[in-house]
């Protein structure tokens, strides 16, 4: 039996923000998404990325890092042009910025 082609590629799961899909800055066990302004616990973020990717038709285990990166880029570009900003309430954004780790704990 071969490995299922539905297995998600782990490429960039530890570097891409699971919420917006953009690549963040990794610092130890923290991932800082400059787009969302949120600091994620890196392992938690990666686990959520893998869960989301498990149902992803475009990214399989053998998808190369280069292709994964391109797919992530294309998607975030599409996000920016098509979708309104999620959680656009300034109060909510401010709360998130003030207590970035709290949002990790509430997952
Ligand atoms: Zn983000």
Image: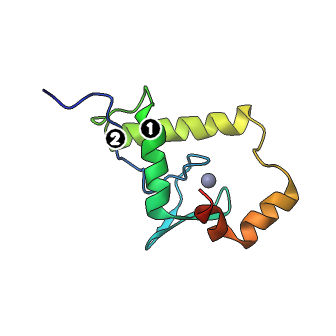
Query: Left or right: where does residue 15 sit relative to residue 95?
Result: left
- Seen at 59% across and 65% down, the residue is 105
Residue 12, relative to residue 103: is it above or below?
above
Q: Which mark is residue 75?
A: none
**Mark 1: C-beta under 8 Å from nearest atom of ligand 1:** no
Disc 2 and disc 1: Cα gap in Å?
A: 8 Å
**Badge 1, how many Cα within 10 Å: few under 14, some, many 20+?**
many
Foreground residue among 20 and 45: 45
Label 2: which secondary element: loop
**Residue 35 showing in the rendered view:** yes
Q: What x and y, as percent, mark residue 3?
A: 20, 32
Q: Earlier in the sequence, mark 2 or mark 1?
A: 2
| For the residues bearing labels 2 and 1, Cβ distance under 8 angstroms | yes
Q: Residue furthest left?
A: 1
Instruction: Name which quarter of the figure residue 63 lies in.
Output: top left
Q: Residue furthest front?
A: 106
Quadrant the N terminus occupies? top left
Q: What x and y, as percent, mark residue 106?
A: 63, 60
Q: What x and y, as percent, mark residue 44?
A: 48, 59
- Seen at 36% across and 42% down, the residue is 66
Q: How is the image coloured?
A: rainbow
- Seen at 79% across and 59% down, the residue is 93
- Residue identifier under label 1: 53
- Residue identifier under label 2: 9
Query: Left or right: where does residue 87 sit relative to residue 36?
Result: right
**Residue 70 showing in the rendered view:** no
């Amino acid at each position: 039996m071969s490995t299922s082609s539905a297995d998600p590629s782990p490429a960039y799961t530890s570097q891409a923000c699971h919420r917006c899909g953009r690549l963040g800055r990794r610092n130890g066990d923290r991932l800082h998404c400059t787009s969302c302004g949120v600091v994620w616990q890196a392992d938690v973020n990666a686990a959520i990325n893998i869960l989301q990717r498990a149902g992803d038709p475009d990214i399989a285990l053998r998808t190369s890092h280069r292709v994964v990166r391109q797919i992530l880029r294309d998607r975030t570009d599409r996000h920016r042009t098509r979708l309104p900003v999620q959680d656009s309430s300034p109060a909510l954004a401010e709360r998130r910025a003030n207590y970035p780790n709290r949002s990790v704990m509430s997952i």
